[in-house]
Amino acid sequence: MKISTRKIVDFTLKGLTWLFAAIAFSVLVFIIVHVLIKGIPFLKPSLFEFNYTPDNVSLFPALVTTVLVVALSLLIAVPLGVFAAIYLVEYARRGNKFVKVVRAMAETLSGIPSIIYGLFGSLFFVTWLGWGYSLLAGSCTLSIMVLPLIMRTTEESLKSVPDTYREGSYGLGAGRLRTTFRIVLPAAAPGILAGVILSIGRIVGETAALIYTLGSASKMTTGLFSSGRTLSLHMYVLTGNALYEGQAYATAVVLLVLVIGINALSAFLAKKMSRA
């Protein structure tokens, strides 16, 4: 019995797909297991003390700063990105040259290295505006960095909503504003939330941009114009000292748990939204 060329190609491509998926999954498992083995033995109560000292190398101030940076960055970037996407999809005329320019600029900004954002934040927020190394300067820099991601994911989510939803709402007498916020946005919410999740991951793992804007102070952040360090920056500083290698791995464990927890919570909320 002869086997057709098409079946051979399909079987080969399917095998390659499973192979590469297994390799990617294996790498992920290896990284997680390696971090857990190296870091869990150093997870001690002293690592979570309120104040940082050279003896305890506490990560608690960095954990608080990380949460504040994520919250403040999203508070700035999410409204700007969502409303910009709403304008591009719902209000701007199709084929508008301005829309094409905005999309091209967003795609260009998405490919800029984070160190460039850090240099811009250092020149503009830290020096020109006089904010210094501060929570506000770091958050504003990161909000600019994740803004294209949020805007593009929101735009694609709005486009995926069928036009019949809008036509049905218009047919019942609702205006464009009411249709957008009561019909289109709830339907696109899971996709928008996915973009926010990706943005959180990029903010939590960022170090290059924060070195030039947030600084690396080990103390607890006391205000918007106070310097500090996030967990990733804290881990970066510790790895520069051979005495704190174990604590650096312990910080990686906490960072890993934080990211997994945020993703799990976001997935739960997205599931709830899709059911509603």
Image: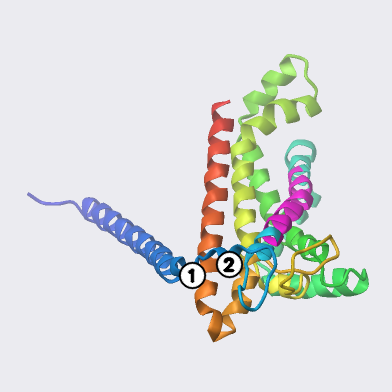
Distance of mark 1 from mark 2, alpha carbons?
8 Å
The residue sitting at the right extreme is 129
Q: Residue at x 64, y 72 (%)?
A: 234
Tag 1 residue: 42
- The amino acid pointed to by label 1 is Phe
Task: Give the secondary structure at mark 1.
Answer: helix
Task: Using a 10 Å C-alpha cutoff, classify the residue at mark 1 as few (fewer than 14 neighbours), some (14 to 19) or many (20 or more).
Answer: some
Residue 81 magenta: yes
Q: How is the image coloured?
A: rainbow
| Tag 2: amino acid | Leu
The dominant secondary structure in magenta is helix
- Image coordinates for residue 49, horizontal then vertical, percent: 64, 64
Q: Quadrant of the C terminus?
A: top right
In front here: 159 or 110? 110
Q: Residue at x 50, y 65 (%)?
A: 43
Q: Earlier in the sequence, mark 1 or mark 2?
A: 1
Determine which residue is flagged by label 2.
47
Residue lying farthest to the left in this orientation = 1
Which residues are drawn in magenta?
Answer: 65-82
| Mark 1 vs 2: CB contact within 8 A | yes
Q: Secondary structure at mark 2?
A: helix
Q: Residue furthest top?
A: 172
In the displayed structure, 176 sits above or below 168; it is below
Instruction: Where is residue 166? Give x, y as percent.
Output: 69, 25
* Residue 67: percent from left, percent from top: 68, 55
Q: Is residue 189 left or right of residue 179?
A: left
Could one spot residue 94 in this view of the protein? no
Residue at the image position 51 percent from the left and 68 percent from the top: 250
Residue 247 shown left or right of residue 107 in the figure: left
